[in-house]
Image: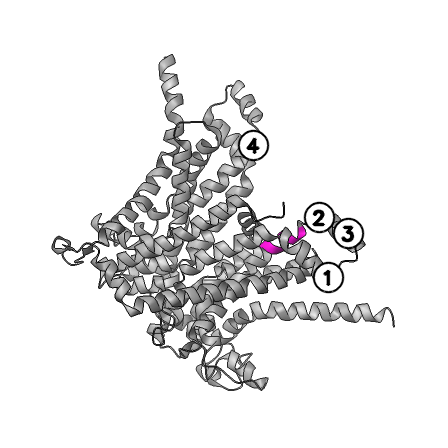
């Protein structure tokens, strides 16, 4: 009787986590191993028995194909543009709206709205807004006497247009985080700076920025990893075009997923390694603590 | 005069803030306006801001373009099933990781973090093949069961459980309360904010999800609303913006209603998830 109780005690923690671990094993670990396996094959979707082992051929094919580099560079440009614009604009808005007043809370909630709306809706609305002939954006530009743009329909501006939509959708979330961070800075620090007659810019550089550096870093990492996975807006608004100008890594994998599974899987492995490296860098820097202390 | 200057400044401050707000809200107003216009009005220049006669018929046209009853039902079934299953899986796991010391817990928890980091964009090809192999490719299950383990949820709830003082649990144990009772009557009621955050997050992200249903489904019978709406451009023609926007309103309204009624909780939930 006593033994039974003790065995139960010993097993319980494992039993409680069993379903969660099963989910991870079946839907994360196993698929990653399966992906690695697929990446070594010329996979035949119609008749898997006819799949052929090709070693690292898919990987060497990736490195030799120009469209892969195009997708990689696009993804990097997209990531850089989105991250920089979001950081700068959300910081400016957060500083502007940091006082906790009713109107500021209302504006913040409004700015946040696009963040909880599906990318499908966002993309459709912006496709319509950015329509070159009838769209509202060009109407505004024309009314202000500014030159209009082809937006998503020209390979020169398509990637920038996708970036604008991403920044517009995401910014509300980062404003919220930064406002919370700014409100967390103790007023006594600012009072001390005021006694020293420090200029506004100096206070911002020497006090505000260092104090919210953990949150800025959090945003930097979350956005970099998230941006490398960009797909939805691309699929909805441009289908990677025009002329591959907005083809990104995940869209590239998606394009090849039925016609060339082995090759798509190898590209998936590359994506995983990139995300892995970014995450690793994140944890390394987190350990070193980007902070004022 | 001296009183007037701060007043003017304040008025301008508020005006600029409203202008900022419009940048984020106007596209939605534009969507609603377009959804009520005639085809001719959508072609006019300058653009029509307020339709002469609201064309509610656009909504009927959009709804008749596909099996939207099925899409809507699928979205609800998928989203609710995911939330329920995730809760059943993550609550015991978070409790175990937070309150028991056991061999290998560190290693096992690192698997949770690993799962958190590997996105569906990496695993979708093998998962799709697995689902076909299992013969469930044409059901709703491929859109539900891969999400059974919510790694973020386990992480968040574990943090929350850890903050509940050990003395409270010991006291309950001395009262001969079973572990289940401790979990249900003590731990869960004290973790309501975390549970609400996790559920809201799941709801928003799976109701809105586009990528996963796109790569998992081949037939209308199992597709959710996001896919149905995105296909309007193909079925209705890419220039029928009034109908496309009507469909879009149908997709956005449920989530906007949820947001309007609990914007405070949602905003708090998102801030909380970002800072922890």
Image quarter of residue B233: bottom left
Region of the chain picked out in magenta, as a range: A177-183
- In three-dimensional space, the C-alpha distance between marks 3 and 4, rounded to whole angstroms, equals 36 Å
Residue A237 spot, x, y in % from top left: 40, 71
Do the residues under discs 2 and 4 have CB atoms within 8 angstroms?
no
Which comes before the other along the chain, label 1 or label 2? Answer: 2
Find residue A191 and name its label. Answer: 3
Whether marks 3 and 4 lie on the same chain: no
Q: Which residue is mark 2?
A: A186
Between label 4 and label 1, give the one nearer the viewer: 1
Q: Nearer the viewer, residue B118 or A19?
A: B118
- In three-dimensional space, the C-alpha distance between marks 1 and 3, rounded to whole angstroms, equals 12 Å
For the C terminus of chain A, give its image quadrant: top right
Tag 1 secondary structure: helix
Q: Which residue is mark 4?
A: B164
Q: Residue at 47% across / 68% down in the picture?
A: A163
Residue B109 spot, x, y in % from top left: 41, 37
Q: Chain of mark 3?
A: A
Which comes before the other along the chain, label 2 or label 3? Answer: 2
Do the residues under discs 4 and 1 have CB atoms within 8 angstroms?
no
Q: Chain of mark 1?
A: A
Between label 3 and label 4, give the one nearer the viewer: 3
- In three-dimensional space, the C-alpha distance between marks 2 and 4, rounded to whole angstroms, equals 27 Å
Do the residues under discs 1 and 2 have CB atoms within 8 angstroms?
no
Answer few, some or many: residues within 10 Å of disc 2's Cα (few below 14, many 20 plus, some between 14 and 19). Answer: few
- In three-dimensional space, the C-alpha distance between marks 1 and 2, rounded to whole angstroms, equals 17 Å
Residue B208 spot, x, y in % from top left: 43, 58
Q: Residue at 58% across / 87% down in the picture?
A: A145
Q: Which residue is mark 1?
A: A200
Residue A276 spot, x, y in % from top left: 39, 51
Do the residues under discs 3 and 4 have CB atoms within 8 angstroms?
no
Whether marks 2 and 4 lie on the same chain: no
């Amino acid at each position: 009787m006593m033994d039974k109780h003790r065995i139960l005690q010993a097993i319980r923690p494992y039993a409680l986590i069993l379903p969660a671990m099963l989910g991870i094993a079946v839907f994360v670990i196993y698929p990653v191993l399966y992906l690695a396996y697929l990446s070594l094959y010329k996979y035949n979707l119609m008749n898997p028995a006819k799949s052929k082992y090709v070693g690292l051929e898919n990987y060497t094919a990736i490195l030799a194909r120009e469209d892969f580099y195009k997708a990689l560079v696009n993804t990097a440009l997209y990531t850089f543009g989105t991250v920089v614009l979001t950081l700068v604009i959300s910081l400016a808005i957060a500083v502007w709206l940091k006082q906790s007043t009713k109107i500021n809370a209302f504006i913040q909630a409004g700015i946040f709205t696009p963040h909880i709306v599906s990318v499908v809706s966002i993309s459709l609305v912006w496709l319509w807004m950015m329509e070159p002939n009838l769209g509202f954006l060009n109407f505004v530009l024309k009314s202000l006497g500014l030159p209009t743009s082809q937006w998503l329909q020209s390979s020169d501006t398509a990637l920038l247009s996708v970036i604008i939509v991403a920044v517009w959708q995401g910014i509300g979330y980062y404003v919220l985080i930064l406002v919370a961070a700014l409100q967390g800075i103790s007023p006594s620090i600012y009072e001390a700076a005021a006694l020293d007659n420090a200029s506004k810019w100096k206070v911002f550089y020497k006090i505000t920025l260092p104090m919210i550096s953990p949150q800025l870093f959090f945003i930097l990492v979350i956005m970099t990893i998230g941006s490398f996975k960009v797909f939805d807006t691309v699929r909805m608004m441009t289908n990677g075009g025009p002329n591959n100008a907005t083809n990104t890594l995940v869209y590239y994998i998606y394009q090849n997923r039925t016609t060339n599974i082995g090759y798509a899987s190898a590209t998936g492995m590359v994506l995983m390694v990139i995300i892995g490296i970014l995450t690793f860098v994140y944890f390394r820097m987190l350990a070193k603590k980007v902070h004022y202390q | 005069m001296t009183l007037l200057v701060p007043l003017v400044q304040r008025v301008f401050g508020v005006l600029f803030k409203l202008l900022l707000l419009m940048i984020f809200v106007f596209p939605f107003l534009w969507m609603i306006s377009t959804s009520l216009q005639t085809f001719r009005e959508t072609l006019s220049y300058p653009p029509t801001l307020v339709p002469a006669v609201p064309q509610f018929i656009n909504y009927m046209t959009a709804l008749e373009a596909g099996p939207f009853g099925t899409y809507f039902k699928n979205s609800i079934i998928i989203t609710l099933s995911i939330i329920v299953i995730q809760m059943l899986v993550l609550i015991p796991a978070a409790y175990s990781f937070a309150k028991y010391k056991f061999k290998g817990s560190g290693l096992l928890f690192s698997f949770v973090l690993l799962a958190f980091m590997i996105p569906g964009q990496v695993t979708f090809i093998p998962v799709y093949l697995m689902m076909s192999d299992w013969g469930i490719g044409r059901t709703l299950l491929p859109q539900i069961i891969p999400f059974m383990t919510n790694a973020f949820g386990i992480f968040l709830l574990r943090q929350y459980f850890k903050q509940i003082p050990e003395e409270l649990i010991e006291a309950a144990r001395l009262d001969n309360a079973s572990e289940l009772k401790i979990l249900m009557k003590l731990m869960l009621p004290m973790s309501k904010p975390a549970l609400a955050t996790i559920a809201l997050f799941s709801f928003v992200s799976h109701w809105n999800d586009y990528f996963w249903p796109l790569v998992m489904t081949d037939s209308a019978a199992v597709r959710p609303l996001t896919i149905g709406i995105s296909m309007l451009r193909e079925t209705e023609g890419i220039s029928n913006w009034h109908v496309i926007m009507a469909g879009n309103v149908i997709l956005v309204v449920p989530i906007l209603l949820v947001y309007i009624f609990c914007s405070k909780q949602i905003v708090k939930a998102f801030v909380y998830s970002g800072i922890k």
